[in-house]
Image: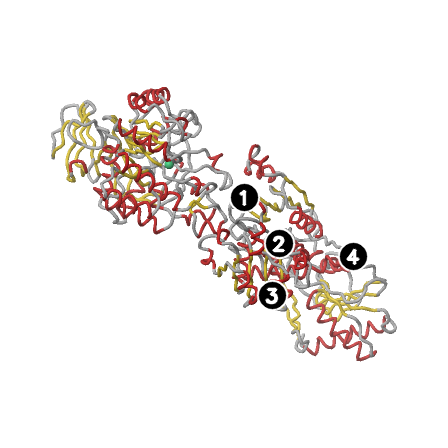
């Protein structure tokens, strides 16, 4: 059993068996991180380049540790898009990196489709670590893994994704992932941050968090980008927090086994109150742990394997 | 030099003509048009049996890039591409570098076209200085230098007051103003049509609304000022309806559509191919159907290419960073024939009219007909020839087209510009 | 090899283990992947019958320790490495179904060592089919079956450990690697 592509670019085109394979492989690999010696030699001599055009310490570190636990050599290239715009184009950068014969390039980029462009130019595998508002497929995989661990089966669950859906790659990847696995997804947020035709992706839309909370099995809270306020998408953070932030008071209406998830980093007191983030329903740290396992699984599945 | 084009099916919408005739060309002009002309001594015979003989096509919306971006296209290469595509006259837009907002640039383009051009070139000057939307260009002076219209194509004149003055002034000169209707505030970072696909891809959308609100404003201004207004590259169903209503109210208005806007939808953006990035963007199937309907009922008068060459280095970029635009001179005719004629959407005569006499009348050019005495701009077409498009053979300097490999039917085989022969290669 | 023959071989291995270790103090069994674990469980239950003591049984997946990652296009679904006893200072007996090139055992040794420093490691296999590529020898062998390289030997066993047999297949696609 293999993934169908040399690259891992989006959940959109993934099949359910592929998702299952990644999840079960990740589950098997979790054990390695619990050992004293947290390293297996399987990818000795393989090179992974983390090419990050946006600052993201969490995701980059997660990929870096994932590679290192599998004994791959991991190189980080961090840059920001402004220096890239005036300097070398992505195509030139890609060709330069290819000349160094990496096995995987992990790319984070502010422009949707940048990983696709890289993948079409290069022979090596490309993993999308987030491309603009398009997709963040490893985030969705780690969210699936976390939900499956806590809830057993994903099919039939009611999942609410709350926040800025328009600009969220996490929302898009999770909508694909959750609907493929049979969950019922509701996106919740101010009307100005719900993109047009989103219902055609098989989700419901709500503008009232209070109506969604009681029936949700999972509340996936998105980070609100503070600069959206200045884009005129909502009047103030204060009002956003009042209408769409999750606090203990609102959570009283929730199911007793509800899961609170957040892709991080959290704006405490804006979209999520500290008591909720650190409370008993929160699985935010499990998400981080599972992120490592999912990324190890992907790296392993993309780079050759064995048949016994 | 005498030329006799024998046995072709002559279609000249200006005269309502569609029959098998011989065409005699003498001294660069059409000398005779009748059945079975006896070849004069020394005349070169051009057999055209089974072919269409139509007036040379006129593309009223091209970007030749010279002066300023000769790496993308020059007047020489652009006009060569035009002729290869069966086009004998082009009107070139003002967004060169420097912007064509003065006599010197207009003169330069005309002199360059005389020296290096392969077809007739007509110059469109800008509406405002530097296309900045603030101060009017010297419209009278530009007209005297030979400009055929004014346009800030690429964007709209944002300030309504400035646009009003521009239309008033242009109408005083009886000159045409061509509008690229788009409210920039409604699509500041947009790179594609706002709809299901933009939502799926996370790309910033350009709503149909951005075109329609600006179009509604410009129609009101045209009604107020009595100016002649031409709407460039109509892309939405709502725009077609607005123009239809405005024309019914008697407002002096004409409009054009491009082959890509009646051939492709936003679905093709799915793979992030930057050759699908155009402005206005590719829209929905309903919009495509409405544009074809508009072309059919005469709401849309003209088919134009919006030929916008860009280097491959610029287009081989992230979708957000790639420039808008695709080349179109060499696909204008094949796409029009395939999507409109062979699909039975429109009669052949009407399609030819939108490529010849209609743009000639809108630009007040003495062109676009095969009347005896007219300059011999003639395009000979193989209407039924099926072929697979290969951009490698195009004469344009740039290769940015989403139609590579498309299966098309109907292409130009021979073009006469003022009686001078050119063979098309596809 | 039918079920009776497999049972006979397992009985042979179990008795040898008991004999060799003069009892079963400080001993643990670790099966290689799923089939190895099933065999280890069968051996443990036989030893329990004889000695009345239940040996701890674990599983390791050798996939992550193979020397041929990316040489082959296929890979099995990973199974979780799960050794529920501390291997440090224990004597560990690795259990596998078929001993062939020895490369799996090499990988298993590495995997086991990453889990801790065992007192000693031994190897028990149901079948030795020959064709070694590494200097590895089993301490306990249920049965030797001579084979050619284009054959494969397969243990077929169900999860309930009720039905099992060994079959020999002609495998024209089998590559020697
Ligand atoms: Zn335009």
Image quadrant containing the N terminus of chain C: bottom right
Looking at the rendered image, the disc whose residue lies closer to the viewer, 2 or 1, is: 1
Q: Are marks 3 and 2 in contact (CB under 8 Å)?
A: no
Q: Is mark 3 within 8 Å of ligand 1?
A: no
Q: Are marks 4 and 2 on the same chain?
A: yes
Q: Is mark 4 within 8 Å of ligand 1?
A: no
**Which mark identifies residue C170?**
3
Res A272 → quadrant = bottom right
Q: Nearer the viewer, residue B45 or B154?
A: B154
- Disc 3 from disc 1: Cα separation: 71 Å
**Residue picked out by circle 2:** A263
Q: Are marks 3 and 4 in contact (CB under 8 Å)?
A: no
Mark 2, chain letter? A
**Residue picked out by circle 1:** A230
Q: Could you say whether the residue bearing mark 2 is in a helix, strand or loop?
A: loop
Looking at the rendered image, the disc whose residue lies closer to the viewer, 4 or 1, is: 1
Q: Is mark 1 within 8 Å of ligand 1?
A: no
The image shows residue B103 at horizontal and vertical percentages of: 35, 20
The image shows residue C17 at horizontal and vertical percentages of: 82, 71
Image quadrant containing the C terminus of chain C: bottom right
Q: Nearer the viewer, residue A294 or C35?
A: A294
**Residue picked out by circle 4:** A36
- Disc 2 from disc 1: Cα separation: 23 Å
Quick check: can you spot residue C71? Answer: no
* Of the image marks 4 and 1, the number of the one nearer the N terminus: 4
């Amino acid at each position: 059993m293999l993934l169908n592509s040399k690259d891992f670019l989006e959940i959109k085109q993934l099949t359910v068996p592929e998702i299952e394979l990644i999840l079960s492989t990740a589950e098997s690999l979790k054990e390695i991180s619990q050992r004293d010696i947290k390293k297996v030699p399987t990818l000795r001599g393989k090179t992974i380049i983390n090419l990050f055009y946006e600052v993201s310490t969490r995701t980059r570190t997660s990929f870096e540790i994932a590679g290192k636990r599998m004994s791959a050599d991991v190189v980080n290239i961090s840059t920001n898009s402004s220096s890239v715009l005036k300097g070398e184009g992505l195509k030139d950068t890609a060709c330069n990196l290819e000349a160094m014969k990496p096995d995987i390039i992990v790319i984070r980029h502010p422009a949707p489709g940048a990983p696709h462009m890289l993948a079409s130019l290069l022979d090596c595998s490309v993993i999308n670590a987030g491309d603009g508002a398009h997709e963040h497929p490893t985030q969705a995989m780690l969210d699936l893994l976390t939900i499956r661990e806590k809830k057993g089966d994903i099919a039939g669950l009611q999942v609410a994704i709350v926040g800025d859906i328009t600009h969220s790659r996490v929302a898009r990847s999770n909508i694909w992932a959750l609907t493929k696995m049979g969950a019922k997804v509701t996106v919740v947020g101010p009307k100005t941050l719900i993109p047009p035709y989103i219902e055609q992706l098989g989700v419901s839309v709500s503008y009232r968090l209070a109506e969604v909370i009681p029936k949700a099995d999972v509340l996936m809270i998105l980070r609100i980008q503070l600069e959206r306020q200045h884009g005129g998408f909502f009047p103030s953070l204060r009002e956003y927090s009042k209408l769409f932030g999750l606090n203990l008071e609102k959570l009283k209406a929730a199911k007793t086994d509800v899961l609170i998830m957040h892709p991080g980093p959290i704006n405490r007191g804006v979209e999520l109150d500290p008591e909720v983030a650190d409370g008993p329903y929160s699985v935010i740290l499990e998400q981080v742990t599972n992120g490592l396992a999912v990324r190890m699984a992907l790296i392993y599945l993309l780079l050759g394997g064995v048949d016994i | 030099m005498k030329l006799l084009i024998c046995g072709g099916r002559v279609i000249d919408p200006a005269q309502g003509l569609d029959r098998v005739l011989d065409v005699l060309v003498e001294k660069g002009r059409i000398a005779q048009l009748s059945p079975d002309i006896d070849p004069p001594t020394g005349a070169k015979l051009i057999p055209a049996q089974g072919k269409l003989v139509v007036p040379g096509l006129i593309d009223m919306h091209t970007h030749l890039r010279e002066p300023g971006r000769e790496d993308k296209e020059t007047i020489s290469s652009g006009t060569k591409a035009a002729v290869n595509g069966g086009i004998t006259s082009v009107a070139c837009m003002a967004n060169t570098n420097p912007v064509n907002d003065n006599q010197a640039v207009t003169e330069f383009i005309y002199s360059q076209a005389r020296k290096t051009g392969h077809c007739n070139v007509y110059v469109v000057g800008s509406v405002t200085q530097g296309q900045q939307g603030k101060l009017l260009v010297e419209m009278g002076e530009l007209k005297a230098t030979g400009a055929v219209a004014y346009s800030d194509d690429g964007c709209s004149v944002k300030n309504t007051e400035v646009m009003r003055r521009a239309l008033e002034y242009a109408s005083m000169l009886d000159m045409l103003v061509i509008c690229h209707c788009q409210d920039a505030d409604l699509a500041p970072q947009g790179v594609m049509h706002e709809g299901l696909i933009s939502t799926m891809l996370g790309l910033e959308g350009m709503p149909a609304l951005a075109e329609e609100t600006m179009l509604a404003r410009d129609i009101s201004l045209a009604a107020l000022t009595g100016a002649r207004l031409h709407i460039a590259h109509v892309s939405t169903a709502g725009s077609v309806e607005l123009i239809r209503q405005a024309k019914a109210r008697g407002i002096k208005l004409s409009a054009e559509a491009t082959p890509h806007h009646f051939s492709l939808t936003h679905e093709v953006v799915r793979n992030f191919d930057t050759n699908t990035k155009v402005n206005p963007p590719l829209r929905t199937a309903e919009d495509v159907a409405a544009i074809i309907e508009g072309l059919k009922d005469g709401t849309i008068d003209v088919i134009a290419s919006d030929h916008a060459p860009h280097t491959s280095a610029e287009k081989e970029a992230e979708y957000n960073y790639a420039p808008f635009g695709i080349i179109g001179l060499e696909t204008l005719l094949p796409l029009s024939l395939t999507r409109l004629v062979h699909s039975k959407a429109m009669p052949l005569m009407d399609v030819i009219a939108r490529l010849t006499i209609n743009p000639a009348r809108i630009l007040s050019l003495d062109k676009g007909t095969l009347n005896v005495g007219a300059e011999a701009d003639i395009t000979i077409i193989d209407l039924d020839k099926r072929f697979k498009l290969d951009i490698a053979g195009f004469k344009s300097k740039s290769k940015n087209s989403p139609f590579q490999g498309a299966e098309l039917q109907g292409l130009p085989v021979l073009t006469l510009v003022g009686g001078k022969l050119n063979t098309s290669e596809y | 090899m039918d079920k009776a023959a497999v049972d006979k071989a397992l009985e042979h291995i179990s008795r040898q283990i008991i004999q060799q270790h003069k009892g079963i103090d400080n001993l643990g069994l670790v099966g290689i992947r799923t089939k190895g674990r099933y065999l280890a469980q069968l051996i443990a239950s036989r030893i329990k019958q004889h000695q009345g003591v239940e040996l701890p049984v674990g599983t390791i997946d050798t996939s992550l320790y193979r020397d041929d990652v990316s040489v082959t296009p296929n890979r099995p679904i990973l199974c979780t490495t799960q050794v529920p006893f501390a291997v440090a200072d224990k004597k560990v007996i690795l259990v596998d179904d078929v001993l062939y090139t020895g490369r799996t055992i090499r990988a298993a040794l590495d995997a086991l060592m990453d889990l801790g420093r065992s007192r000693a490691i031994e190897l028990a296999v149901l079948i030795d089919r020959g064709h070694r590529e590494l200097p590895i020898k089993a301490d306990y062998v249920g049965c030797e079956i001579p084979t050619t390289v284009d054959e494969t030997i397969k243990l077929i066993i169900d999860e309930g450990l009720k039905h099992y047999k060994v079959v020999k297949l002609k495998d024209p696609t089998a590559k020697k690697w």
